[in-house]
Amino acid sequence: MSRLVPILDNGHGGMIGGVYQTAGKRSPKWELGTLYEGMFNRWIVNGIIEQLDIMAIPYYHVSPEPRDVSLGTRCDRANTIHSKDPNTYLLSIHANIGGGKGTGIEGFTSTGATASDRIAELFLCNIENDMCNERMRFDYYSDGDRDKERDYRVLTGTNGPALLMELGFMDHPSDYKKLWDKWHRQELINSLVGSIDQLYNE
C-alpha cells in the first residue's frame, strides 16, 4: 500500500462573513458556544494539510471553498482525481450527532470486502493506540475489522478506496468539550497524519 496519496474532504460548508453555510450540522448551544460541523471539519483538514506540506507529502483537497460544496460535486472531484492518479484514496472528515447518547470515534467504509478496509484499519488502529483514553466505536462482528460499514454516498459514489471518519459527537457533553479543545484536535491531527505518512512512505 506504499505511496498512497490522500484526497482530503472536509464535509459541509464553513463560515462566510460569520454565517454558517450548511443547515443543521451543529451542536447545541452549550457553554462554549455552537460548534458547527463544517467549521470543525476544516480545522482538522487544515491542520492535516499544514503538516503534510511540512513533510512534503502530496495530497489533494476536494472541498477547499468555504461554501457548502455538494456531495455530488465532491464525489465527482474525487473521481476525476482518481482517474488521473489511481494511487489515491478519499479521507472524509466529520463530526457526529447521536441524539445526545452517542460518544466516541468511529470510521466507515462501504459494505463488503473492499480496498478501503485495510486503509480504514490502519487509521482506526493508530487512533486507538495514539489516543488510548478515547472511546472507540468499532465493529468487530461483520467482517473482523474495526470499521463500520455503511453505503454512504461519499463511500459508494467514489471510484477509489474511501474512508469516512467521525471524530466525536457534537451533541454529547464530553465529546463536545473535546472537539472544542485545541490540544485534543491536535492529537487527532497528529494521528491522522501519522497514518497518511505510513501509507505514503512505508
Image (cartoon, rainbow, N blue to C red):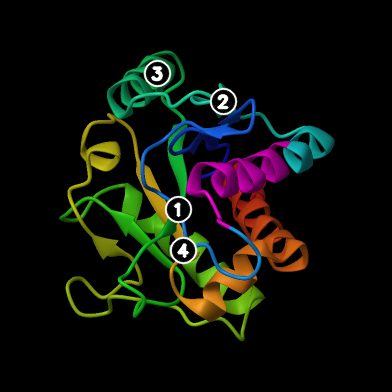
Which of discs 2 and 1 lies nearer the camera? The answer is 1
Q: Which amino acid does label 1 sit on?
A: Arg
Which comes before the other along the chain, label 3 or label 4?
4
What residue do we see at 26% from left, 75% from top? 144
Q: Where is residue 4 in the image (x, y as percent from the top left)?
A: 53, 37
Q: Name the mark on residue 66.
A: 2
Give the residue pinned by disc 3: 77
Cα separation between marks 4 and 2 = 22 Å
Instruction: Rate crowding at label 2 as few (under 14), some (14 to 19) or many (20 or more) other CA atoms within 10 Å.
Output: some
Which mark lies nearer to you, 2 or 3? 2
Dot placed on the residue nearer the N-terminal end, 2 or 1: 1
Q: Which mark is residue 26?
A: 1
- In three-dimensional space, the C-alpha distance between marks 2 and 3, rounded to whole angstroms, equals 16 Å
Marks 3 & 4, CB-CB < 8 Å contact: no
Residue in the image at 32% along x and 26% along y: 75
N-terminal of the pair, mark 2 or mark 3, is 2
Count of marks, rendered view: 4
Q: Give the range drawn in magenta.
A: 34-49
Q: Distance between the residues labelled 3 and 4?
A: 32 Å
The residue shown at (63%, 48%) is: 44
State which tag comes first along the sequence, 1 or 3: 1
Q: What residue type is labelled 4?
A: Pro
